[in-house]
Amino acid sequence: MRYPTLARLAAMAFALSLSAPASAQPTAFRGAEIIPISGPAIANGVLVIDDGRIVAVGSESDVSIPGDAQTIDVSGKVIMPGLVDTHSHVGRVEGGDRSAPLHPGVRTLDAIDVRHSSVNRARAGGITTANIMSGSGHLLSGQTTYVKLRDGGTLEELLICENPLTDVCGGMKMANGTNSISSNAPFPGTRAKSAALVRQLFLDAQAYRQEIADADDDENEMPDRDLAKEALVEVLEGRRIVQFHTHRHDDILTVLRLKDEFGFRVVLHHVSEGWKVADEIAAAGVPCSIIVIDSPGGKEEAVDLRYDTGAVLEHAGVDVAYHTDDYITDSRLFLRSAAFGVRAGMSREKALEAVTLAGARMLGLQDRVGSLEVGKDADFVILSGDPLSIYTKVDQTWVEGRMVFDLSDPEDAAFANGGYGVYDDGALYHDHGGPN
């Protein structure tokens, strides 16, 4: 049995004082530089939260701190919105199997281990909202799941939707290119066959939707319930966003044709060769969630991945976000993606937006997260310095007014500083006191 040290007991007491129930009293953070994303940075700023929401943000001269507020001095620190990861595989998530290349009825929310240490690592990286999805070995591997990285021991405590039985709780993961091509039936062996299978799938979903419309609520005329087609109808109606893995320029254009033919909302993911067709992506009005990696060229279709893809897309007028694809980029290093973007020519403003508000837009969650604005969820990170500096550390991560990561806590620090696969056995899952 591990007995806590005096240092850890002190850290636990401090954490408990800061992570009291969100409705207990307002909390004001003062003295930090605040980067709201939705506006210019605020020197000597004040952030006031209450009941899990932001109630005030601005300079100390402009914000009146409530008399009953707990005030925390964060002078010398930087506060910015919690990071939004549009493409994550934390929680040992699973999707469809090898029985078919298309699995629209599969829900990843039925296969996410929220107690796995990878979730703690994401909190250690300042990530507060994540789109958890299955892999890209299928043309369609299943429904993704949008989560808040709250403390909690069950998926229901992390879900953004209210009811997983009735609500749309995420997007739809699709892919094209080499990952989803196989010579083994029933998988397609070519790009052309891949596109044909996807087109037929959506044609069948359109017919299913028409059958429902023709039935006009007459139970005797309603078609048999089909979980796969139900999810695809949500896509066709714009209620479920397609998150599409695609690398090569020709594969990217195939996605844009599918989008035009069936009218669904889509986010292009990875787009290693997006810089080659930036104008076409911009003309289609389609956002891109991209990745930067230390050693590009691991697969044939990604050999032309460039660090300046974000800059090229930004200058073309494309909405750009970054993602981790964790483990491809460790969640703890997510802020580094924005730094790479600036180094390769992105503006500082758009690079920081690319790990916050732009990602929120790509999940349809921009009214709740992604920027520090009155009325939005109190999701934020406290940094030791400039968010683009390699020397900066995530000191604390807060979700809806509750601290879920604290670098001064030795157990949390282990997730922040440990090596690859730290605590992957899940034995040291760290709960900060239960769900909201």
Image (tube, grey):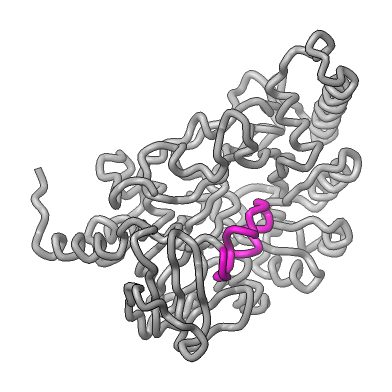
- Total marks shown come to 0
Seen at 86% across and 17% down, the residue is 215
Q: Is residue 135 above or below residue 215?
A: below
Seen at 51% across and 44% down, the residue is 89
Q: Is residue 249 above or below residue 379?
A: above
Q: Is residue 3 above or below residue 186?
A: below
- Residue 370 in magenta stretch: yes
Q: Is residue 140 visible?
A: yes
Pick the residue in front: 84 or 134: 84
Quadrant of residue 399 in the image? bottom left
Pick the residue in front: 16 or 421: 16
Q: Is residue 148 left or right of residue 120?
A: right
Quarter of the picture containing the N terminus is top left
- In the image, the segment drawn in magenta is 356-375
**Can you give x and y, in whole percent of width and height, for residue 69 in the image?**
35, 73
Quadrant of residue 284 in the image? bottom right
Pick the residue in front: 151 or 115: 151
**Can you give x and y, in whole percent of width and height, for residue 327 in the image?**
48, 49
Seen at 72% across and 47% down, the residue is 246
**Dominant secondary-structure state across the stretch colored magenta:** loop
